[in-house]
Image (tube, helix red, strand yellow):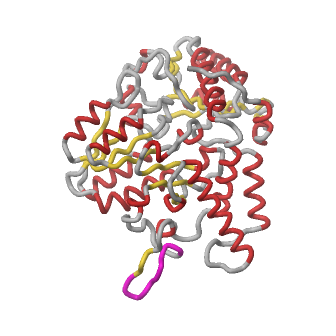
Amino acid sequence: MILSVTLDISSVRRQFPVLRRSINGRPLVYLDSAATAQMPEAVCLAMARWNKEQKSNVHRGMHVLAEESTVAYEDARTAVQKFLNAAHPDEIIFTKGCTESINLVARSWGETHLQEGDAVVLSMLEHHSNVVPWLQLKDRKGSDVLWMDIDEDGMPKLDDLKKHLKTGRVKLVAITALSNVLGIAPDLKTIIAMAHDAGAWVLIDAAQAIAHMPIDVQDLDCDFLAFSGHKLYGPTGIGVLYGKRKLLEKMPPFLGGGMMIRSVTQEGFTPADLPGKFEAGTPPIAEAVGLAAAIEWMQQYSWEDIQAHEQELLRFAIDNLRLIPQLHVLGTDGKSQIINHKSPIVYGCLSFTLDSVHPHDLTEILGRQGIALRAGHHCCMPLHTKLGIPASTRLSVGIYNMKEEIDVCAQAIVDAQKKLHT
């Protein structure tokens, strides 16, 4: 159901300096937020202020700058805790991105909890960041990776999950909260409940979902959740791993070095308590400040307004793209050969193919006109193989996009199609 939109989009757009850019004399049309979202002025200023006035390393320093930086860094942790509704601040681990967060779980939890013959379940929707770490673990430990196929709606097949869980071998289900190709959101609560009933833990890859839907880790009852700050209108270089305290406390450190120890001798070391034992070395302090500022900025808008606006944009995009001959929006027609639901509720993005036109050629032409799309397999090669296509073009939206930009993009696709077919 599409709700009424009450956002003042003009006011929102004025807060993003990059949207004032022109590319080759044409206004920038940024439809690539699934790759990285732009940052509002408030985030840029918060990071600049820290760099200019407070820059210092955190923890243990007794001078004013160190104390101020430590407060800012730990305040950022609290901001993330509240944003996710985690039970404790020390359940929030800062990393350099969602990829590192998932690797932390694979290396720390996986190395100590998985044995030969144990299994991790993935879905066909997964980004490579939630595939490769488990394949690496398979090579090291002799564990298995089992797959949930997708049904005609593009959703993971719960019958596959049920079958895998019945084997008694599954120790973890690692699942995306939102497909970065189809914009489809799996039924996380059902998947989590099924996994827990079978004695398995659950990791959620929330990289795509974090800017498009509310996430309450206690309500979901997930065991781990990962995301990157740059998808949430924040900076690159910072990610988050949420983990239940009871699990994190039993996991060994991921990286070794300064700050993650309580004591070191010539014979060994004692790791620090949470969250420090997982944050070796100088952390991304400016980036944490930026992430906290992005969360504060986001919270001035309601999720109802954000979702209503973005779903209206995507519905408008689907309806307009469908009018283009030989263009096939994945998940909304039969061209994909696999999924064929007619009225999808999608979040954040959609992907399409254009007969006889490679996505790279299309996006290069549009890119010269200032229209930013994404081409390729979007780090989802298993899904593209399943769909029977080597690549697709992705259009993704953020809070700052307008219908007029969709119109410009659609007309540019039509013009490019004519140019490439002549």
Determine which quarter of the picture holds residue 338: top left
Q: Nearer the viewer, residue 364 or 197?
A: 197
Region rendered in magenta: 259-268
The residue shown at (26%, 48%) is 119
* Picture residue at 49% right of the left edge, 21% below the top: 344
Check the image and name the residue furthest to the bottom.
Answer: 266
Residue 232 in percent (x, y) is at 62, 44
Residue 16 horizontal side relative to residue 218, left or right:
right
The quadrant of the image that shows the C terminus is top right
Residue 54 visible in image: yes
256 vs 99: above or below: below
Q: Residue 326: x percent and y percent?
A: 52, 13
Please check the rendered image and state whether residue 292 is part of the magenta-colored stretch, yes or no. no
State the image quarter where residue 322 is shown. Answer: top right
Residue 355 appears anywhere in the view: no
Residue 237 at what x, y percent from top left?
A: 59, 56
Q: Main secondary structure of the magenta part?
A: loop
Residue 62: which quarter of the image?
bottom right
Is residue 243 shown above or below 220? below
Residue 23 pos. (x, y %):
76, 35
Residue visible at 79% across and 65% down? 52
Residues 337 and 221: in front is 221
Based on the picture, tell me whether residue 262 belongs to the magenta stretch: yes
